[in-house]
Image (cartoon, helix red, strand yellow):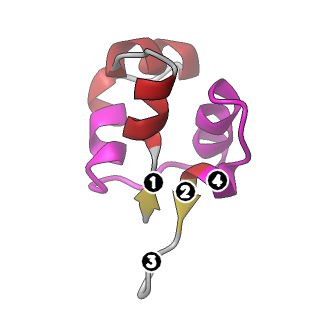
Amino acid sequence: MRNTIKVERARHDLTQADLAEKVDVTRQTINAIEAAKYVPSAVLAFKIARVFGKNAEEIFELEDGD
């Protein structure tokens, strides 16, 4: 699953730790999601999208084979 979290964090001047705190996960979880090593739950995907004022589909995109 591809995502634009790193880009959105930069636009909103947030660190991984800042975003993690806002969505109640660890910085390591945000890092793993950004690196496509972990697929977030639907609830977490919606929480992340809400922080950026976007829909989950604008942040997360399925890749072929997902």
> Quarter holding the C terminus?
bottom left
Quadrant of residue 53 within the rendered picture: top right
Q: Label 4 to label 2, Cα distance in Å?
A: 6 Å
Q: Label 3 to label 4, Cα distance in Å?
A: 14 Å
**Residue at (46% x, 48% y) in the render:** 4
Marks counted in the figure total 4
Which kind of residue does numbered mark 1 sit on?
A: Asn
Q: Label 3 to label 2, Cα distance in Å?
A: 10 Å
- Disc marking residue 66: none
Q: Label 1 to label 3, Cα distance in Å?
A: 10 Å
Residue that carries the numbered disc 3 in the rendered image: 63
- Nearest to the eye among marks 3 and 4: give it: 4
Looking at this rendering, what residue extends furthest in the front direction? 11
Dot 1: element: strand
- Marks 3 and 4: CB-CB under 8 Å? no
Q: Earlier in the sequence, mark 1 or mark 2?
A: 1
Dot 2: element: strand
- Nearest to the eye among marks 4 and 2: give it: 4
Residue that carries the numbered disc 4 in the rendered image: 58
Residue extent of the magenta highlight: 30-58
Quadrant of residue 29 within the rendered picture: top left
Residue that carries the numbered disc 2 in the rendered image: 60
Residue that carries the numbered disc 1 in the rendered image: 3
**Residue at (42% x, 38% y) in the render:** 7
- Label 3 neighbourhood size at 10 Å, few (<14), some (14-19), many (20+)? few
- Marks 3 and 2: CB-CB under 8 Å? no
Magenta-span inclusion, residue 34? yes
Which kind of residue does numbered mark 2 sit on?
A: Phe
